Amino acid sequence: MSFLSLNRKKDEKINEVINNQENRQHDRLNLQVDYDLIIDKILSEFIVNRASLINSVERGIRQKKDLNNEILIFLKTNEIYLTKIQVIELLKRFETYVWGYGILQELIDDNDITDIKTIDYDNIRIKTKGKRKKANIKFSSRESLKKYINYIATKNNSMLSEINAIQKFTDKNSCKKFILRINISSEFINSNDLPCLIIRKIPKDKYNLDKLMELDMFNDDIKTYLREAINGGLTMFFTGKGASGKTTLMNALIDEIPKDAACLVIQEAEELFTNKHPDMIFQKVKQAKGDGKIQYSLRDLSINGLLSDVDYFIIGEIKGGEAYDMANAIYTGHIGMASVHGNSAEEAINKIVHYMKYVSDMKKGELLEMLSNIDTLIFMKDFKIMQISEVCGFDYEKQNLIFNRVYEYQINEKKDGYVSNFVRLNDSCDKIKNKKKYCDFRNSIMGE
């Protein structure tokens, strides 16, 4: 064999080694394009083992670049090789996980989306302008979805387990535009062996009554009625199924409460808030977690609230025995506001009585007499006021409440389709007129 041939073979061997090294490096880089896998590793390290570093950055003690440097060291130590462009993309995605909600962040930032639900890793459901549909994003796998949901629970100081299979919490700080009401159910209770994450978005820039009228929740006549009801110190209850608009309307109305009134707001999910009223205290339920025994229920807060110097006694949503305490509050002169699930304005009363029975052995008629101090019942459906009824008084002979239906949203069939409008059925009853008259008189004196 000639020297030239030997030399050529040697060169070919060297090139082969170089090519193999480049291919291995290229393969490593290609493998790391799965950012979710890398982020899972980083989250496990920095959330579980080194949470103090993230907390220090969040509190402004250390800078984000310090965290990024530690991540780069972690990548090198674990032999995770990335190009400069891939590192930039990785750090960008990591930030959306730590300071936001990662893959779901674009759905949270979308102003038109109100609800997000994970059915499966490739089936994320959203509600946009009242219509449900499948989102155009998905997780890489079921395992990725599980890790993501567990991280969201940990991020919000919760832990999923057999003891804590259901977690409910509110995130008021991660998103500039929305308060996030979050509900997580673990695979321990879900039949498909997957945790489920449900996010309800409440705008921080609240709708006022004028904006809600633009959105066709009600017409101008009803808007005037609502303003007069609030200024007149009427006790108002809101009913309908979930996502019907109850909380949105209540949030608009609490900003209309006279500024000299003292208010207490009790709620399980932190959805009601104000940026305008100067004398409004907000309290939230604290559930016992795991083996912990300490908790404060809606009823605990309601009983304590009755000892406070407040004019308005507000419960975000009545779900149990606190219904009795609300009834007792309005029976003793407080102005009440609350929501409860129901299929009509009048049927909501039966639901409230049912809840009152949880803690009281009084007869139904006696409980209804207490509830005669409710002034206005508003039934909502699909982000629209369907009915407004007034409680005129109590019929002692029939042991029942006397109702006056004031407004109704009517749908009529025509030859070419349907026509709908808000219809005023009756004037307000004397009880309501007298309350408004007294409030106007009081305000005139206070004004002097």
Image: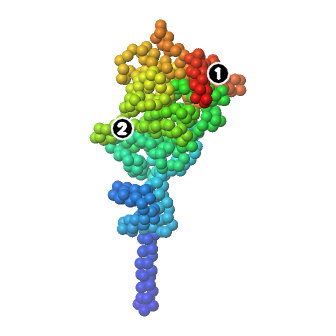
Rendered location of residue 397, percent (x, y):
47, 7
Q: Nearer the viewer, residue 337 or 411?
A: 337
Residue at image x 44%, y 42%? Answer: 170
Residue type at tag 2: Gln
Residue at image x 45%, y 74%? Answer: 22
The image quadrant that residue 184 belongs to is: top left
Q: Nearer the viewer, residue 377 or 266?
A: 266
Q: Is residue 294 above or below residue 403?
A: below
Quadrant containing the C terminus is top right
The image quadrant that residue 253 belongs to is: top right
Residue sticking out furthest to the top:
397
Residue at image x 63%, y 18%? Answer: 427
Residue at image mark 2: 287
Rendered location of residue 90, percent (x, y):
47, 61
Q: Is residue 1 above or below residue 30?
A: below
Q: Is residue 359 visible?
A: yes
Residue type at tag 1: Arg
Residue at image x 33%, y 58%? Answer: 49
* Label located before the other in sequence (2 or 1): 2
Residue at image mark 1: 424
Quadrant containing the N terminus is bottom left
Rendered location of residue 433, percent (x, y):
60, 19
Q: Is residue 91 above or below residue 417?
A: below
Residue sticking out furthest to the left:
291
Local SS, label 2? loop
Q: Is residue 215 visible?
A: no
Q: Nearer the viewer, residue 433 or 341?
A: 433
